[in-house]
Amino acid sequence: MKSKIFKDLILIFIMGILYMVLEGLWRGWTHISMLAVGGVSAFLIGRLNEHPMFCDRKMWQQCIIGTLIILVLEFTSGMILNVWLGLDIWDYSREPFNLHGQICLSYTLIWFMLVPFCVYVDDYLRYRLFWEKEPQGLLRNYKDLFTLQ
């Protein structure tokens, strides 16, 4: 049990760091809280991909489910960090189709397109760090998405 929790924490940490790097490249800066928000989002998407009920779903279906996971975590953490604590880490209030400035349609589309990358990173880390099955490949994930497979 301890080793499973340790393994999960390693995955959350690495994927959180990776998210912070991507956000830093995109926005020019990031916030330490994104280690947890990005890491947990990516971890949950990866765990979902490992679950027997979801692993055989088509990539576009995994993208929809993964995007919903991200939106729930982004909205919840945004309400806590940005609204209640006043940290102002992000503000989508000027974006069209936003909800309380915490989530918006344009970033929803970006999250949707990042899910295949997230699935691959989770599979790759599990393969390299924990000797689990070899991932099918990042390009394969996107091919499956665009061909609706």
Image (cartoon, grey):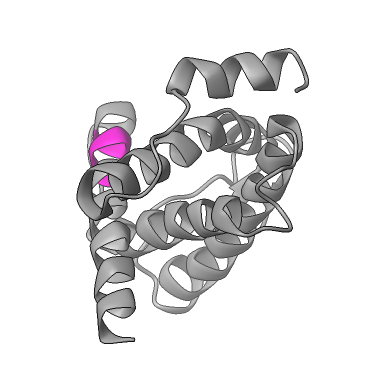
- Vertical order, 82 against 133 (above or below): below
Residue 129 image position (x, y, % from top left): 21, 50
- Point out residue 78 in the picture as x, y percentages from the top left corner: 50, 64
Frontmost residue, 132 versus 140: 132
- Name the residue located 26 percent from the left edge and 28 percent from the top edge: 25
In screen coordinates, is 41 left or right of 4?
Answer: right
Nearer-the-camera pick, 27 or 65: 65
Q: Which residue is drawn at 70% across and 52% down?
A: 54
| x, y percent for residue 68 | 68, 52
Which of the 4 image quadrants contains residue 29?
A: top left
Please, what is the dominant secondary structure of the magenta stretch? helix
**Residues rendered magenta in the picture:** 20-24
Q: Can residue 63 be seen in this view?
A: yes
Name the image quarter holding the C terminus: top right
Left or right for 65, reference 37: right
Q: Is residue 102 visible?
A: no
